[in-house]
Amino acid sequence: MRVEIITVGDEVLRGETTENNTVWLSIALTAAGLPPSRQTSLPDDIGVIRDELSSAAARSGAVIVTGGLGPTVDDVTRQAAIDAFGGGIEVRDEIVIEIERRFRELGFTMPDGYRDLARIPAGAEVLDNIVGAAPGLAIDAGECLIFLLPGVPGEMKEIFSRLILPRLSTGEEDQRKVLRVYGLMETTVEERIATLLDADELERLSIISSPTGISVYLPAGIDTGTVERAKEILGDDLFGEGSDRLEEVVVGMLRERGLTLVTAESLTGGMLASMIVSVPGASETFLEGYVTYSNESKIRILGVEKNAIETDGAVSEEVCGQMAEGAVRISGADIALSTTGIAGPGGATPGKSVGLCWMGLSHAGVTECRKRKMGGDRGMIRLRTAGVCLDMLRRRLLTENR
């Protein structure tokens, strides 16, 4: 089945919001053996949306539209669909009755704008929204199914997973194996994997890099033996498979070993701790986190020596190590991770440029600090630093387990 995705919203085209619905839908559809054939972003313009819906229905078997279903004046997707598929309107009062009930449960009165949500394309199926207000809609356009979904990610994902994916699924899931790697460049990963694949398989290999690791999408149908050889050739740089995240793997390793963790962050400002506690079950291993952004707080809370800061500077191996050691000492945790650096755009000093970062790890009386020059903007530098910290811990645990 040819499937396409349409995203609606002026805010998306103007870059006023980060649009991740298309990425999420593409991943979900591809995993179900239905990789999208087309992705389109449209403005909040009834005519433009109407024409695109008509064209999409003629060329595809299913079209998934996100955005423009709410109660405000710029939410025009429903009307565009009405115009695109014959102009018939059906009023479904039960939609508004249910929305009113939910508002009452929350102690609010439903704004009148929501009453227009009862107007839907004639014959459309209502896809109930158990997370938010505006329901989704399914329209049978002859040879094509049109699905209209809210643009709010949580609402879109729930409706799609529960009501749409099951009816689109072919039962032949994409069997591509995904390997997750940290610590290598994309080109190095490709060079290693290329030795295992023939020319056709190599053309279907996908390697996608991000600050939190590289995803290696092996070709569908590749034999188990080749997958296992790929794992071997990647060695300790392989940290997981499928949708594994580095923080999930690290938390899992800590839980298996019964070890506790604490963080002491300057540069990352709590980002490292946030990544760790995003993992279910992190409470079994993560004790606490210290954000010691100022020099004074490093001294007062972690016991960093004032002389070390004055002599070496806050962005230094000595201070980074003392931060980790102090965090272990005052928390009683088995392991501490620490970060300090210059995220920019200002803050550079002679000999210490923007992007200079130190990551520390203290465990069992041994403290290790690693120096890296990170590229990217302020957010990217902080994210990369947190990733390196997690990978340091992963590799230390691997080594100690041998």
Image (tube, grey):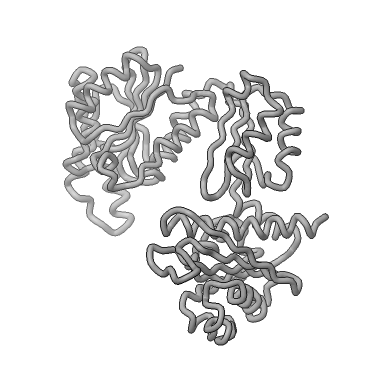
Q: Position of residue 285 (x, y in %)?
A: 66, 64
Q: Residue at x 41, y 55 (%)?
A: 377
The residue sitting at 38% across, 63% down in the picture is: 345
Q: Nearer the viewer, residue 395 or 136?
A: 395
Residue 337, position as x, y percentages in the image: 62, 67
Position of 35 relative to 354 (above/below): above
Quadrant of residue 58 within the rendered picture: top left
Is residue 28 or residue 15 the one in the foreground?
Answer: 15
| The furthest residue to the front | 350
Residue 122 coordinates in the image, percent (x, y): 24, 23
Compared with 290, 213 (above or below) is: above
State the residue in front, 382 or 146: 382
Residue at 20% over, 41% down: 115
Q: Is residue 401 visible?
A: yes
Q: Quadrant of residue 10?
A: top left
Res. 327 visible in picture: no
Number of callouts in the render?
Answer: 0
> Image point 62% across, 70% down: which residue?
262
Q: Position of residue 379 (x, y in %)?
A: 43, 57
In the rendered image, the quadrant that contains the C terminus is bottom right
Q: Is residue 103 left or right of residue 38?
A: left
